[in-house]
Image: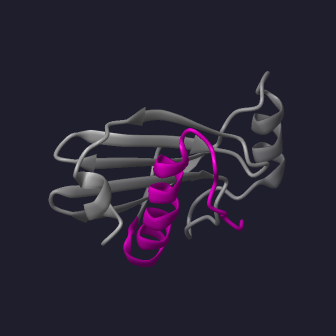
Amino acid sequence: MTLELAASNDDRALVIRDHLLLLVRRAGTLKVQHDLVRTISFEQPPWVVHHWTPFNDLQPGEASSPGYRHAVERQRSTLDLPYGLEVWHDKLVLRVLWADDGRSRVECFVRGPWEDLALTL
């Protein structure tokens, strides 16, 4: 997936997302949830960044049936935004969801000095 900077009302949030995605993918720790989502986290106090994606490569010992994955995907009645990034700087300051087709939604964006600090990580 190629990420591009976006120009919209949420452009600052998406610029921070793009910057932190590179960081969390490079220096994050893989964590597996109990559902079909894979989470990678970067923690360096006061920062905690969680990035989740659907249907990633499986770890040894995890079920790998593609039929099961496709069946679960077909059960969804609406298209969702399967990718997400959540940023904590002592408190939740940013949550962005997006899809491969370019759709995105900024669910939480608390403006403040943390924005510039995030871009220096």
- The x, y position of residue 30, in whole percent, is 43, 65
- The x, y position of residue 104, in whole percent, is 64, 41
State the count of labels: 0
Tell me which corner region of the image, top left, top right, bottom left or bottom right, holds residue 16.
Answer: bottom left
Residue 111 in magenta?
no
- Residue 121 shows in this picture: no
**Vertical comparison of 12 with 78: above or below:** below
- Residue 12 shows in this picture: yes
Q: Which residue is pictured at 31% across the width and 40% down the height?
A: 111
Residue 12 in magenta?
yes
Asked whether, in this view, residue 68 is left or right of residue 25, the answer is right
Q: Which residue is pictured at 70% across the width and 59% down the height?
A: 64
Asked whether, in this view, residue 43 is left or right of residue 65, the answer is left
Looking at the image, what colour scheme do you see? one colour
- The x, y position of residue 95, in whole percent, is 43, 40
Q: Which image quarter holds the C terminus?
A: bottom left
Residues shaded magenta? 1-29
Asked whether, in this view, residue 72 is left or right of residue 28, the answer is right
Residue nearest the viewer, comparing 71 with 24: 24
- The x, y position of residue 59, in whole percent, is 55, 67
Q: Which image quarter holds the N terminus?
A: bottom right
Q: Which residue is pictured at 25% across the width and 45% down the height?
A: 112
Q: Which residue is pictured at 52% across the width and 62% down the height?
A: 18
Asked whether, in this view, residue 8 is left or right of residue 38, the answer is right
**Vertical comparison of 100 with 97: above or below:** below
Residue nearest the viewer, comparing 51 with 11: 11
Farthest residue to the bottom: give it. 26
Tell me which corner region of the image, top left, top right, bottom left or bottom right, holds residue 98.
Answer: top right
